[in-house]
Image: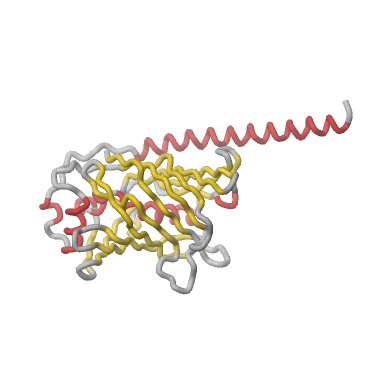
Amino acid sequence: MTNLVKTEFAIAGLIFITLLIFWFLWLMEERQLRRIGQSLAAQSSQEIFSEAMIADLPIPAQRYLRHAIQVGTPLASSLSLKFTGNTQFGAKSKLWPLKGTEILITPQRGFLWKETLQTGLLTQNGLLYYANGKGRVRWNFFELIPDPAKSGGGTNDAAKAMLGRFITKYIWTPFAFLPQQGAVWEAIDDEHAKVTVSVDGTPVTITLTIDAEGRLQESVSLRWGAKTEDGSFAYFPYGIKVEEEKTFDGYTIPSRLSAAWCYGDVDREPPLVFHYAIEKAHFS
């Protein structure tokens, strides 16, 4: 056997062992994800939505909740959904296809978010979650090969970042904005209101824009992220603009929207922009 053949066999063996290690790590993390999903599972409430639940809220809040939840709808505890869309790495960059394959949102407890991003010939599989006070981001190429530049977890920054992301998803779970869930409302004017929710003892305030019919137009909150020029973490405005809505299981939620970091900052181009179209949603 020539030295060239030996070298080729050695390289092939090294690649095989590396892929085997990646597969083992992926398998272990998938098992962890199943446990997280089980921890987020919650039984539906026996309560039914009624006008009396929102009678003491500011007028914009009443208008929004009355529009978002049909009277007589059982109050859900969680939401599962799937979406298609795209993302831009900058407001003027190319649109890259994005697909949400497994989304579970349980207000006050956490979320599990799995998506696939297609950038040219590369398929990247993203996993993001917040549960039990911990947050993590994982990106792999073709399911197995980790992308360390876009992955991280187990740190306070990761937990704060995923907590902020989690709260932005509350626009899809309007039952989480009921006072019976601990939400505190404050009217700004007839079309704007602030709602504060708490997760694991951390309060987060969201500013909502609500039209005359109660439709949600816009959501803005502060998110913790590494969007500074030097890559350090700080709070940045994160905004969502609602374009369309649909009704699922008695809940009317945004079905087509765009979202961006550094929202409203006229001096800076958004570093990351998302466009979502909800295909399926189920409240339970």
Q: Position of 199 compared to 124: left or right?
A: left
Report the residue at 19% width, 59% height from top: 213
Q: Position of 75 compared to 11: left or right?
A: left
Report the residue at 44% width, 62% height from top: 261
How is the structure coloured here? Answer: secondary structure
- The answer to which image quadrant residue 48 occupies is top left
Q: Residue furthest top?
A: 1
Residue 1: give x, y in percent of width and height. 88, 25
Q: Position of 270 compared to 2: left or right?
A: left
In the picture shown, does residue 233 fall above or below 200? below
Quadrant location of the C terminus in the rendered image = top left
Residue 189: give x, y in percent of width and height. 21, 70
- The answer to which image quadrant residue 220 occupies is bottom left
Residue 24: give x, y in percent of width and height. 58, 32
Report the residue at 48% width, 33% height from top: 31
Q: Residue furthest right?
A: 2
- For the image, the number of numbered tags is 0
Q: Position of 159 compared to 203: left or right?
A: right
Q: Residue furthest bottom?
A: 267
Depth check, front residue: 191 or 88: 88
In the picture shown, does residue 10 fall above or below 280? above
Residue 218: give x, y in percent of width and height. 31, 61
Depth check, front residue: 110 or 254: 254
